[in-house]
Image (cartoon, rainbow, N blue to C red):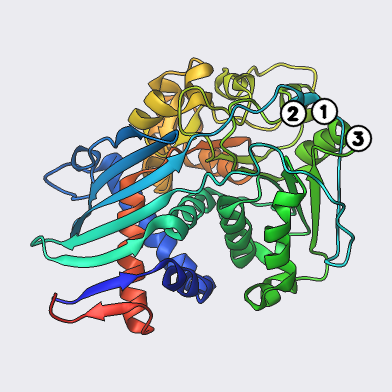
């Protein structure tokens, strides 16, 4: 049985070769796996949650944590092992600091700025994914650095793809997670996107991302996907940050939050006040993964699960009454926003349940909703919050597909008789 080894460079090369049809195929397989995770049993599905052990973490020296994430699909078993650096706590002034920076062209001058403590340290997970076939024979060995960011964005854009309006996207962060969320959004819906607003603690730490977007041939087609597409960068180191932050948040159709923050990245009132509630948004929270970490203020989640009042004086976007999560068990244990908002299992729904609309509609009816019609309307235009802490099955499902694609495209190293 051949073993295929993909280095970090191999993974990047492979991922940048993917077109829209490739991405849709990967999303389909991931959606099937997540659906089986949420609804399958050990008798009917290898992907069911009973076959997915909770990850194990070990604190190592130099303020680092190593995660062990075992998983199983119908055809493979595997484990991802990654090490993450600890994240310094953001200063409270981040939420209220008044400063900004915007650029719309690659030729805009970049001032000399000293990066913040957080932006000067990499929090990218480093490690590997090992994949075995159903007999235990090694099938693949993949560098997990780029894979982790890609599979997270791939899962995050499952619900993004259902949105009826995606003209304006606001992204918090400028690392690999932000990179792949922006790239996949443009691959999937680039003709409809007019504004991509990137918000980061430091302009200096955003420069690598912008150099890729404006200078790399991998981005040429995406940059030119429509003539209305504009990128802006805003940093907390310049004037009028508070005013422009509120503007970027409230004007967004989609918000991708991709930072390992321990404080909310903007005041709850930007979304909970009357003006903030008039518009439906899709908000994806993927950066925080421990109980003390939060990107979105817990008050926003509390409001999202409040019962809908039929009589109010202002027009509000529709709520689903739940927060969407990748794993109910994992998020109740690890997701800071969920824990600090005091949410319980009845106020959460796994994304794997929602991806099969007809089946999910039955549960929506049980909660007193309209069924398929109401569920579809909420997913397409209402306020949808998705929280992910990451699952090993995501890595295994996507990794298995990447091994197959790599062999077809002669990428990586394959050992025929391992």
Left or right? Give the position of 356 relative to 87: left
In the rendered image, the vertical position of residue 171 relative to residue 15, given as above or below: above
> SS at mark 3?
loop
- Distance from disc 2 to disc 1, alpha carbons, whole Å, reads 5 Å
Mark 1, residue position: 97
Q: Are marks 3 and 2 in contact (CB under 8 Å)?
A: no
Image coordinates of residue 127 in percent, x first then y, are 36, 53
Q: Are marks 2 and 1 in contact (CB under 8 Å)?
A: yes
Image coordinates of residue 84 in percent, x first then y, are 44, 42
Q: Is any atom of residue 10 visible in this view?
A: yes
Image coordinates of residue 8 in percent, x first then y, are 43, 66
Q: Residues within 10 Å of mark 1 (few under 14, many from 20)?
A: some
Mark 3, residue position: 240
- Distance from disc 3 to disc 2, alpha carbons, whole Å, reads 13 Å
Instruction: Say which of 110 and 356 sits in front.
Output: 110
Instruction: Say which of 345 and 260 sits in front.
Output: 260
Measuring 44% from the left and 37% from the top, which residue is drawn there? 389
């Amino acid at each position: 049985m051949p073993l295929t080894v993909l280095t970090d460079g191999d993974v990047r090369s492979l991922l940048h070769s993917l077109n829209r049809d490739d991405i849709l195929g990967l999303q389909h397989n991931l959606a099937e796996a997540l659906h089986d995770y949420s609804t399958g049993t050990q008798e009917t599905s290898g992907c069911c949650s009973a076959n997915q052990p909770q990850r194990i973490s070990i604190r190592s020296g130099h303020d680092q944590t190593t995660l062990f994430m075992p998983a199983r699909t119908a055809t493979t078993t595997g484990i991802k092992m990654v090490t993450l650096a600890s994240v310094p706590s953001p200063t409270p002034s981040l939420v209220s600091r008044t400063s900004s920076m915007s650029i719309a062209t690659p030729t805009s001058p970049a001032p000399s700025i000293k990066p913040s403590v957080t932006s000067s340290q990499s929090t990218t997970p480093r490690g590997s994914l090992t994949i075995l076939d159903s007999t235990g024979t090694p099938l693949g060995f993949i560098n997990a650095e780029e894979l982790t960011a890609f599979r997270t964005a791939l899962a995050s854009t499952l619900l993004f793809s259902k949105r009826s309006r995606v003209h304006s996207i606001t992204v918090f962060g400028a690392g690999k997670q932000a990179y792949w969320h922006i790239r996949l959004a443009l691959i999937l819906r680039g003709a409809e996107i007019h504004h991509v607003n990137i918000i980061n603690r430091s302009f200096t730490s955003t420069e690598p991302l912008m150099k890729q977007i404006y200078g790399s041939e991998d981005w040429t087609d995406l940059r030119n996907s429509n003539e209305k597409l504009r990128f802006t960068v805003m940093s907390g180191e310049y004037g009028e940050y508070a005013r422009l932050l509120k503007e970027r948040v409230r004007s967004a159709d989609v918000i991708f939050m991709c930072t390992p923050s321990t404080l909310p990245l903007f005041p709850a009132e930007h979304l909970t006040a009357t003006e903030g509630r008039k518009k439906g948004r899709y908000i994806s929270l993927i950066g925080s993964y421990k109980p003390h970490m939060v990107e979105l203020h817990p008050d926003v989640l509390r409001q999202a699960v409040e019962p809908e009042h039929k009589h109010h004086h202002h027009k509000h976007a529709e709520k689903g009454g739940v927060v969407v999560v990748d794993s109910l068990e994992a998020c109740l244990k690890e997701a800071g926003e969920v824990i600090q908002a005091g949410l319980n299992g009845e106020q959460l729904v796994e994304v794997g349940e929602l991806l099969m609309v007809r089946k999910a509609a039955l549960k929506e009816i049980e909660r007193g909703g309209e069924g398929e019609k109401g569920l579809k309307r909420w997913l397409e235009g209402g306020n949808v919050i998705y929280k992910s802490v990451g699952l090993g099955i995501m890595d295994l499902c996507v990794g298995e597909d990447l091994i197959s694609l790599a062999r077809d495209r002669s990428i990586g190293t394959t050992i025929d008789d391992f």
